Image: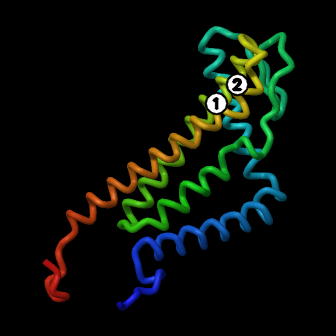
Amino acid sequence: MLKKNIIELPIGKFALKAVSLFILWYGFYELWLLPNGRLDHWVALRVIDGSALMVNVLGFEVWIQERVVGIVGNSGILMVDGCTGISAIGLFLGFIWSFPGQNKSRLLFSIFGIAVIYIVNILRISMLILMQELAPQFFDFTHDYSTTVIFYVIIFFLWMLWVRISEGLESLAPVDTAKGSL
């Protein structure tokens, strides 16, 4: 019986690319972006601005001081680097660029996915601001479990959407009859 090398199988190629991209992203983020702090700081301030706007639209008076945001009368929540969504975006992009597909479509879907993750993070931080005001006894649970699960479930659905899109694009690709494909 002839065994194929795992790297030659589509799942092996995907896994190798995904692990390689994850290691590169992790090293790049942990060793350069995170210690530098400028990107996380900029993203944190944008997410805080969006979250404050959303909570304000709901009728609450919001205050912001650097990376802390809250409803007037509360101590507020501090948005640390791990809450910016940048690492989740890296995880998302690693999957998209590891999975087969056309580069132009990957680029467009990457931009779409980053926007979705950014918006979901604004909603997540808004929910935490509201939780601190309306049900502070559930803040820790909401922060540690609920919003985190929702965040990663959305990323998972984005991945599944990409799989469907990329498979659909592959079926639309012209068949190469020179290689004997039908």
SS for callout 2: helix
Q: Residue at x 60, y 12 (%)?
A: 58
Tell me the amino acid under the disc marked 2: Leu
Residue 65 x %, y %: 84, 28
Residue 143 x %, y %: 72, 30
Q: In this view, does 69 lie to the left or right of 153?
A: right
The correct choice, above or below, for 155 with respect to 28 in the image is: above
SS for callout 1: helix
| Viewer-nearest of discs 1 and 2 | 1
Quarter of the C terminus within the rendering: bottom left
Q: Earlier in the sequence, mark 1 or mark 2?
A: 2
Residue 96 x %, y %: 47, 60
Quarter of the N terminus within the rendering: bottom left
- Residue density around tag 1, few if under 14, some if 14–19, many if 20 or more, within 10 Å: few
Q: Residue at x 42, y 55 (%)?
A: 108
What residue sits right under mark 2 in the picture?
128
Q: Which residue is drawn at 65% across and 15% down?
A: 56
The foreground one among 53 and 86 is 86
Among all residues in the image, which is located at the extreme right? 75
Q: Is residue 155 left or right of residue 130?
A: left
The correct choice, above or below, for 35 with respect to 79 in the image is: below
What residue sits right under mark 1 in the picture?
146
